[in-house]
Image: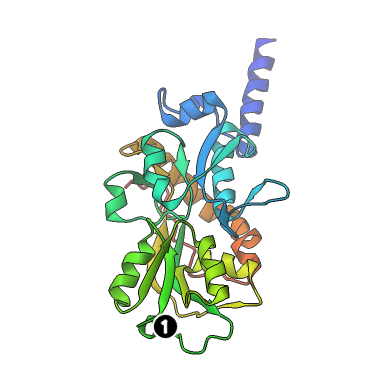
């Protein structure tokens, strides 16, 4: 009977791999991946108020969006099921602290890779590349690009890279810094501010929920590569996640996640899709 049992064990392992799971024995002992697998739940820092990216549906409580789908793919690899995931609302100003304090295992929250942040946490290779743009009222005719922002009031979020870029490109603009971009929308609709500026993906989500009164300028500037944030110097975990991202880009799972989330706005993946790293490459 032993050969039969051994064969069944091998077949079960193969079935798990085919379904997207991971054999726990494949994870190095003591690694973050092994600890998450043993715990059985992946804890993810994400935004709750960014439609198309990370959004908590008020009716169902389900977290939807591209970031959420990427996180679920990771949960499936580490725990065997995308359902074994716990989302924690994470504001831009909290991302580094949540990783350092162990509140979350990873952050998947439109987290742009910057040198300043890399001094505090580690990032995977980009899983998405955004650009900055401007969201204005639908009847606005005087704002076509950043050169038109002198004397205008522009809302952005604290702890974001958008504010720094605006200060450099539009020094004559008056910046209003909010905790989240969703706070900027009522002010824009009411005419208290003239524009909202951040990543085009985030603006597409805001526009998706306010299609009648707002419009995207459509003159993107800058480059915002999103990475998955992990605790500083956890190289083994980071490299494992890099391998997953490259696999998702190659096997169609990245495309399906985009199609079902950001793609519903009419956006195409051309600019946002990063080039997958060569198989077996290391940073």
Q: Quadrant of the N terminus?
A: top right
Estimate the x, y position of residue 149 in percent, counting from the top left.
Answer: 38, 81
- Nearer-the-camera pick, 35 or 121: 121
**Left or right: 186 with respect to 169?**
right
Q: Is residue 179 above or below residue 139?
A: above
**Left or right: 197 with respect to 267?**
left
Residue at the image point whose x is 63% and y is 68% from the top: 208
- Locate residue 131: give its quadrant: bottom left
Q: Is residue 46 visible?
A: yes
Q: Secondary structure at mark 1?
A: loop
Q: Is residue 124 visible?
A: no
- Locate residue 179: give its quadrant: bottom left
Estimate the x, y position of residue 230 in percent, counting from the top left.
Answer: 40, 41
Which residue in the rendered view is the most extreme toward the bottom?
Answer: 141
Residue at the image point whose x is 32% and y is 77% from the top: 170
**Left or right: 228 with respect to 63?**
left
Which residue in the rendered view is the most extreme toward the top?
Answer: 1
- Nearer-the-camera pick, 282 or 273: 273
- Nearer-the-camera pick, 158 or 232: 158
Which residue in the rendered view is the most extreme toward the right?
Answer: 59
Estimate the x, y position of residue 161 in percent, counting from the top left.
Answer: 36, 61
- Locate residue 162: give its quadrant: bottom left
Q: Which residue is mark 1?
A: 145
Residue at the image point whose x is 61% and y is 39% from the top: 20
Q: How dense is the environment of label 1, judged by Cα within 10 Å: few (below 14), some, or many (20 and up)?
A: some
- Nearer-the-camera pick, 207 or 238: 207
Estimate the x, y position of residue 237 in percent, counting from the top left.
Answer: 40, 37
Report the colour scheme: rainbow
């Amino acid at each position: 009977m032993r050969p039969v049992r051994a064969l069944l064990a091998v077949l079960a392992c193969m079935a798990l791999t085919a379904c997207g799971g991971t054999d726990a024995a494949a994870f190095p002992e003591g690694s973050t991946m092994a600890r998450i697998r043993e715990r059985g739940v992946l804890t993810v820092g994400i935004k709750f108020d960014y439609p198309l990216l990370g959004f908590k549906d008020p009716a169902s409580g389900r977290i939807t969006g591209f970031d959420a789908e990427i996180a679920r793919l990771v949960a499936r690899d580490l725990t065997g099921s995308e359902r074994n995931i716990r989302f924690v609302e994470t504001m831009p100003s909290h991302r580094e602290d949540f990783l350092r304090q162990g509140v979350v295992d990873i952050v998947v929250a439109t987290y742009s890779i910057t040198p300043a942040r890399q001094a505090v946490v580690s990032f995977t290779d980009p899983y998405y590349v955004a650009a900055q743009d401007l969201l204005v009222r639908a009847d606005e005719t005087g704002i076509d690009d950043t050169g038109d922002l002198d004397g205008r009031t522009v809302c952005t979020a604290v702890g974001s890279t958008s504010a720094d870029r605006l200060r450099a490109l539009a020094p004559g603009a008056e910046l209003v810094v909010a905790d989240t971009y969703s706070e900027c929308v009522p002010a824009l609709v009411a005419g208290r501010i003239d524009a909202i500026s951040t990543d085009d993906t985030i603006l597409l989500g805001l526009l998706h929920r306010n299609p009648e009164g707002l419009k995207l300028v459509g003159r993107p500037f800058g480059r915002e590569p999103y990475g998955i944030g992990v605790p500083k110097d956890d190289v083994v975990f980071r490299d494992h996640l890099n391998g997953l991202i490259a696999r998702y880009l190659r096997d169609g799972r990245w495309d399906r996640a985009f199609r079902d989330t950001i793609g519903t706005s009419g956006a195409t993946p051309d600019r946002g899709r990063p080039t997958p790293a060569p198989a077996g490459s290391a940073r």
